[in-house]
């Protein structure tokens, strides 16, 4: 910093090279120190994203401690401590569907995500892992070990429920009658009316990424559009507003596939 301040003073005399060289040495020293600290064991830690209510408690407590000038400010420690206690209580989605169905992740019995990620989906999957506090490489998670796949799609079990991913119309013969959660990578045919949740490309285009929470056999759905709300610069869309190409017909091929 002193060298940076000395530089404009030295410029009228064409002597700025000396202070700039000294400033460069200082920057190199700081970078070396940062790299050394980052290389220490335990220098980087990962924690799951905290729920909104815990974050609000910590912020309110911090503001209370900052704004008061008397001993009353110590009361701000109460919501801060409460927020830290509630931080691990956030619910993480059991199923995530994004990018037109090209990326999908399910939570295994071990509590970790297992994903099917298409080309160009690594960035989104990395953000999901970051939100989870999961330090595994994206390539390892994208192997989709929780899924069973064939030429027409994939299936997985999530908390006892069958999730099916249909890549082509032949897969719908079985999936539309058996799947509790059905993800279709094209526009849903009119004749497909499964008993559970259906998400197709039109739904994803209108609502954004889907997050599904399964609790006691009930499925709760959250989407990007629900969290963002209806804004003038990002209005909420309906399925009728999505002009997608027709895909699939009511007369599906008689070909099926087995599900676990």
Image: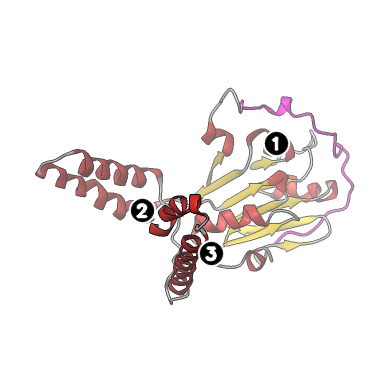
Residue depicted at 40% across the width and 43% down the height: 52
Residue highlighted by disc 2: 87
Residue 226 placement, left or right of 66? right
Relative to 110, is 51 above or below?
above
Q: Nearer the viewer, residue 75 or 44?
A: 44
Residue highlighted by disc 1: 205
Which numbered tag is attached to residue 85?
A: none
Q: Secondary structure at mark 1?
A: helix
Task: State the quadrant of the N terminus.
Answer: bottom left
Please check the rendered image and state whether residue 246 is part of the magenta-colored stretch, yes or no: yes
User: Callout 2 environment at 10 Å: few (<14), some (14 to 19), or many (20+)?
Assistant: many
Residue 112 placement, left or right of 74? right
Q: CA distance from mark 1 to mark 3?
A: 30 Å
Q: Choose the circle earlier in sequence order: 1 or 3.
A: 3
Residue 65 at what x, y percent from top left? 21, 44
Main SS, magenta residues: loop
Residue stretch in magenta:
235-260
Residue situated furthest bottom in the rendering: 41
Residue depicted at 67% across the width and 57% down the height: 122
Q: Nearer the viewer, mark 3 or mark 2?
A: 2
Residue situated furthest left in the rendering: 71
Residue depicted at 79% across the width and 29% down the height: 243
Please check the rendered image and state whether residue 82 is part of the magenta-colored stretch, yes or no: no
């Amino acid at each position: 910093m002193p060298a940076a301040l000395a530089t404009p003073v030295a410029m009228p005399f064409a002597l700025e090279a000396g202070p700039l060289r000294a400033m460069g040495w200082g920057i190199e020293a700081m970078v070396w120190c940062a790299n050394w600290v980052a290389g220490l064991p335990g220098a980087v830690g990962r924690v799951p994203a905290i729920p909104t209510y815990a974050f609000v408690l910590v912020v309110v407590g911090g503001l209370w401690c900052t704004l008061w000038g008397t001993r009353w400010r110590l009361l701000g420690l109460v919501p801060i401590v409460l927020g830290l206690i509630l931080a691990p209580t956030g619910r993480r989605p059991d199923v995530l569907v994004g990018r037109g169905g090209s990326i999908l992740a399910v939570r295994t019995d071990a509590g970790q995500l297992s994903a099917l990620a298409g080309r160009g989906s690594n960035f989104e999957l990395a953000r999901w892992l970051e939100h989870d506090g999961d330090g595994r490489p994206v390539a390892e998670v994208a192997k989709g070990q929780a899924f069973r796949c064939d030429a027409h799609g994939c299936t997985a079990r999530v908390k006892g429920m069958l999730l099916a991913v249909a890549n082509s119309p032949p897969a719908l013969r079985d999936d539309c009658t058996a799947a509790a959660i059905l993800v279709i990578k094209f526009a849903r045919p009119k004749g497909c009316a499964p008993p559970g949740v259906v998400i197709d490309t039109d739904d994803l285009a209108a609502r954004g990424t889907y997050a599904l929470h399964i609790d006691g056999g009930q499925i709760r759905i959250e989407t990007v559009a629900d969290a963002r709300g209806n804004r003038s610069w990002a209005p909420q869309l309906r399925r009728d507003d999505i002009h997608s190409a027709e895909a699939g017909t009511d007369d599906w091929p008689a070909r099926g596939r087995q599900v676990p």
